[in-house]
């Protein structure tokens, strides 16, 4: 066997055998090749005593074995191998049985090359438990989009028929990219910025772009969580504030859809108390004539937003050691709430109407391009590859972790959660349609945040034990948002008129939106130009160096041991 350790060597110095170390270095490759490709001769028989003796001496220790061509000594001196590194025990027996053979060794010899590579990367933090990693990935992938976006996209694109393109896009698009990102992060043990030096250094700007996009998305997602926190605090009452029309924010158009008062008349201008609570009390839209005159900051929402940012900070301030423990609550609690809401929704009158509307297949929709585009967008939106989060999470794994199994488990859990959330939402929508005496399609016209904060909130308010269900529901929304650090945002190639309620966004706001998007992408070409300008050499040399991965050991003191065993 052959063991090597890093040791000092300088060009032009002589080994104890009088040979130039530089000459030894020139023969290092050929010598190592000889070690790995050497043909070992094995006799036909070995007696049992030799086997026992060899096994006892080989058990639990590594034996050094110097390899040289017949009639020629190694380039290194005693205790060294040809790469100039000293061996651990130069006087150790050269084979497993203790006999000092020079080449072939005794029968059954295992020749092992232990190469210790020294890199300059500091040791990277690792997960305390494997389950910390799995729950973190599940918590990232399973977010609010699984609860409000998938059910809406599903029924809009053919119900049960939509599951076919969704599964195909998952198998051939989402899951492979999901696995690739986990594998890259685990292999290189790098985040979304530093990993590009191992792939193609000139594209390092992509990593910076990912970070900027993440910052933008954090503003949006944390705002949703602030709304949910406001609803949560408002739920600690005997009567939920969005169930009545006698509050200070209500208008004469406020109409309780589920009222038993026969004198109530329904008009096109009627608004439910849940919708008025969301628009006039939470968002306070009526206090501002439009985006050209924003008005004052809502101090209630500002405090809720500050609290959310504080929770996020203390969840990650010590790295994976703290975030890995937080996800035990934030990733598992939503599943408990979803199960409770599913059982409660299934017992409501009219729930079956919602389930039928959710799953009834419309196979004709599969012939339209938009269904397949929505399926691809949903699977990428849900799994979230390409945002660097999976790279960062996987980089804290052991090198030999089975990331292929992790990718299959976490992506399957994510897809099943989306499917389960559809039942949770549509059982309640069926109940609302039954109470309003309307079609499910009419009730389910809202999508996005309004589906949660208006339709579902109103349904919960009219259930028995409404306070309990409201508390756990909005607490689940907060947990889902806290888990998801980044999500993939949708973008429009040719945007139509952008409206919020009855406000039509002016042209300058569209331009501002594109500027925000470009501000993240501009990092990619900017870093390319910067890298080419600061790299030495001709343009061809600079370009070649920019697309060549940096070799291991170019960035920090970390020792990796590679063991290559050749057995007879």
Image (spheres, rainbow, N blue to C red):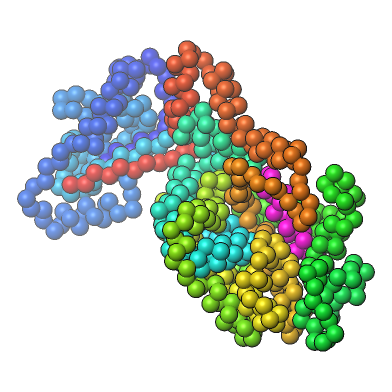
Q: Residue at x 56, y 64 (%)?
A: 156
Where residue 462 appears, as percent x and y from the top left, is 75, 81
Count how many numbered circles sit on residues in the image.
Answer: 0
In the image, residue 219 lies in the stretch drawn in magenta: yes
Q: Quadrant of residue 75?
A: top left
- Please give left or right for residue 445 compared with residue 261 in the image: left
Left or right: where 254 falls relative to 425 = right
Q: Which of 523 and 433 lies nearest the eye of the viewer?
A: 433
Q: How far across and how far down the image is residue 441, in percent?
A: 62, 71
Magenta-drawn segment: 215-232
Residue shown at 34% from the left, 40% from the top: 114
Is 89 included in the stretch rendered in magenta? no
Q: Quadrant of the N terminus?
A: top left
Camera-nearest residue between 235 and 74: 235
State whether residue 184 appears in this view: yes
555 vs 263, nearest the viewer: 263
Q: Main secondary structure of the magenta part?
A: helix
List x then y, in percent, for residue 426.
Answer: 60, 74
Q: Is residue 201 above or below residue 459?
A: above
**Residue 121 placement, left or right of 271:** left
Q: Quadrant location of residue 100? A: top left
**Can residue 343 be seen from the camera position used here?**
no
Q: Residue at x 45, y 27 (%)?
A: 547
Q: Residue at x 93, y 69 (%)?
A: 248
Identify the residue at the far top of this view.
Answer: 538
Relative to 189, is 257 above or below?
below
Q: Nearer the viewer, residue 356 or 181?
A: 356
Percent x, y of residue 13 = 38, 16
The reply, left or right, for residue 236 in relation to residue 453 is right
Residue most extreme to the right: 248
């Amino acid at each position: 066997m052959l063991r090597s350790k890093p040791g000092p060597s300088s060009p032009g110095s002589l080994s104890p055998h009088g040979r130039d170390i530089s000459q030894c270095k020139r023969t290092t490759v050929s010598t190592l090749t000889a070690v790995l490709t050497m043909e070992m001769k094995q006799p036909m028989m070995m007696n049992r005593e030799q086997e026992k003796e060899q096994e006892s001496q080989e058990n639990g220790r590594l034996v050094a074995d110097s390899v040289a061509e017949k009639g020629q000594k190694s380039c290194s001196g005693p205790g060294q191998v040809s790469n100039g590194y000293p061996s651990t025990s130069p006087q150790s027996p050269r084979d497993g049985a203790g006999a000092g053979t020079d080449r072939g060794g005794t029968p059954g010899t295992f020749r092992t090359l232990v190469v210790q590579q020294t890199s300059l990367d500091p040791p990277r933090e690792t997960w305390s438990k494997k389950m910390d990693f799995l729950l973190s990935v599940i918590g990232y992938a399973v977010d609010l989009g699984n609860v409000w976006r998938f059910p809406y996209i599903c029924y809009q694109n053919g119900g049960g028929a939509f599951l076919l393109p969704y599964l195909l896009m998952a198998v051939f698009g989402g899951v492979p990219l999901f696995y690739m990102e986990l594998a890259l992060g685990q292999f290189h043990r790098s985040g979304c910025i530093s990993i590009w030096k191992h792939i193609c250094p000139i594209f390092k700007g992509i990593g910076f772009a990912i970070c900027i996009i993440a910052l933008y998305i954090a503003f949006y997602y944390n705002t949703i969580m602030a709304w949910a926190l406001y609803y949560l605090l408002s739920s600690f009452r005997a009567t939920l504030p969005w169930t009545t029309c006698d509050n200070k924010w209500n208008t004469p158009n406020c109409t309780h859809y589920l009222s038993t008062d026969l004198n109530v008349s329904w008009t096109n201008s009627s608004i439910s108390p849940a919708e008025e609570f969301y628009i006039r009390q939470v968002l306070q839209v009526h206090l501002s004539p439009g985006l050209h005159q924003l008005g004052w900051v809502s101090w209630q929402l500002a405090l809720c937003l500050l609290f959310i940012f504080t929770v996020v900070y203390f969840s990650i301030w010590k790295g994976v050691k703290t975030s890995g423990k937080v996800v035990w609550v934030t990733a598992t609690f939503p599943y408990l709430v979803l199960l409770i809401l599913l059982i409660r929704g299934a017992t409501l009158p009219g729930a079956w109407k919602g389930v039928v509307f959710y799953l009834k297949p419309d196979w004709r929709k599969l012939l339209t391009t938009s269904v397949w585009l929505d399926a691809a967008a949903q699977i990428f939106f849900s799994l979230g590859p390409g945002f660097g989060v999976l790279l960062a999470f996987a980089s804290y794994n052991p090198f030999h972790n089975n990331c292929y199994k992790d990718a299959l488990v976490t992506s399957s859990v994510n897809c099943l959660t989306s499917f389960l959330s559809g039942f949770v939402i549509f059982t309640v929508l069926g109940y609302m349609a039954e109470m309003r005496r309307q079609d499910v399609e009419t009730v389910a016209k809202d999508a996005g945040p309004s589906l949660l904060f208006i339709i579902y909130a109103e349904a919960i308010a009219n259930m028995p034990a409404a306070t309990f269900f409201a508390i756990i529901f909005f607490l689940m929304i907060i947990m889902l948002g806290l888990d998801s650090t980044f999500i993939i945002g949708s973008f429009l190639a040719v945007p139509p008129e952008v409206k919020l309620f009855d406000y039509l966004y002016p042209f300058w706001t569209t331009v501002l939106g594109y500027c925000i998007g470009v501000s993240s992408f501009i990092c990619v070409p900017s870093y390319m130009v910067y890298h080419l300008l600061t790299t030495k050499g001709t343009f061809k040399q600079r370009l070649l160096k920019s697309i060549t991965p940096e070799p291991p050991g170019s960035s920090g003191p970390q020792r990796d041991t590679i063991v290559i065993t050749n057995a007879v």
